[in-house]
Amino acid sequence: MRLFWLDNLKAFGVFLVVFGHLIPESYLKQYIYSFHVPLFFFISGFLFDRTKYSFKQYLRKKLNTLLVPYFCFAIFSYLFWFFVVRNFSISGKSLAVNSLKPLIGILYAVGSDSWRDILNPALWFLPCLFVVEVIFYFIKNKYFLLIFAVLGYFVAYSSFRLPWSVDVAQTAIIFYGIGYFYKDRWCTYKNLPFLLVLHLVFCFTNGRVDMNNMIYGNIFNFYIAAYSGILFWLIISKILGRNKICEYIGSNAIIFIGLIGTTWFVIRGGVYIISGVKLESLSVSSSIIASLLQIVLTIPAIFIINRWMPFILGKRKYAAG
């Protein structure tokens, strides 16, 4: 049985990922980045069930549902960049990159450098989640999370990025573990005001956060801001009740994330061709409209992938939704 509030939460997270990539540096962006990536690791941990599979079965499942989508969307993004963006780019950034560089970047799977960020940097999340899920399979005691919290803190000071965001995984696994170990210990509705105040205070006293780039600010503030923000929106998601649109977005979250870079270029290119205007920096209202347009533009791809190309998602046959 699908959990309606989980779909609501995933749909909200998808919108924040799309919206967060569009808006300039601001207090709003600081708020979004304080918890939107930890939110997805938390959700993944909530869904984890060690008893369902042997490790061999589990590993095969994660290869199919995380790495296969990663490489499929990454290769598509590369082909789109090579044949379309390089020829119709409205900025010089894409033209200045050697065509082999992004291919190596796909294999290295880090979304924060020039080897990957011209394609779809949001894809870094998938190999990182794969690393987290493989490691967590062997964690039986929640106190092991403290070890990773310490590792994540020190690794963040390194200027050298590890492949597949293994460095980020040391911090991400904390939220994954919280989602798993505390899945049945939700805060009650009456705690919403407290959670909101807690989240806002620790979010805005911490400063800029960007997990992809291992920027956490004060690590203590970071964990409290992220966890309180997740719980706040989790409860809101329960209050909202079942919503068909959220269910649709939530069940296809990986496709939305996989095509963020492509849909944004289509919008930018379309606006430039029609009006000659380059969309470099958007207002909040324009970012909301552009985010909704990106979501709408992804719908045909969702239909095509689910109907005729389910292997991209690690599925063998068509699944409705």
Image (cartoon, helix red, strand yellow):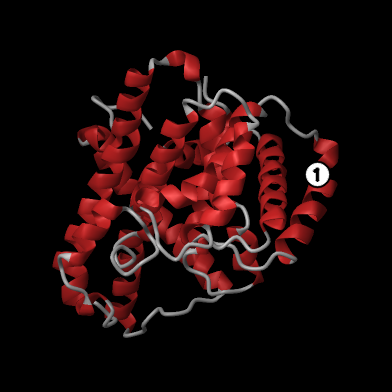
Figure check: 197 above or below 126: below
- Taking 132 as reference, is 85 left or right? left
- The image quadrant that residue 236 belongs to is top right
Q: Amino acid at mark 1?
A: Leu
Q: Which of 188 and 221 lies nearest the eye of the viewer?
A: 221
Percent position (x, y) of residue 35? 61, 52
Residue 272 pos. (x, y %): 31, 79
Residue at position x 25%, y 33% in the image:
310
Outermost residue, bottom side: 276
Question: Looking at the rendering, which quadrant does residue 173 occupy?
Answer: top right
Question: How many callouts does the rendering have?
Answer: 1
Find residue 3 and report its image quarter. Answer: top right
* Circle 1 residue: 192
In the shown orientation, is residue 223 left or right of residue 72?
right
Is residue 299 among what the camera can see?
Answer: yes
Position of residue 262 relative to residue 23, above or below, is above
For residue 115, side relative to residue 260 (left or right)? left
Q: Position of residue 300 (x, y in %)?
A: 30, 47
The location of residue 73, given as percent across then percent down, is 27, 49
Task: Between residue 300 and residue 262, name the one nearer to us.
Answer: 262
Query: Quadrant location of the C terminus?
Result: top left
Q: Tag 1's secondary structure?
A: helix
Packing grade of label 1 (10 A; few <14, some 14-19, many >=20) is: some
Compared across the picture, whether 58 is left or right of 76 comes to right
Tell me which residue sits at (75%, 66%) in the image.
205
Foreground residue among 256 and 131: 131
**Residue 319 appears in view:** no
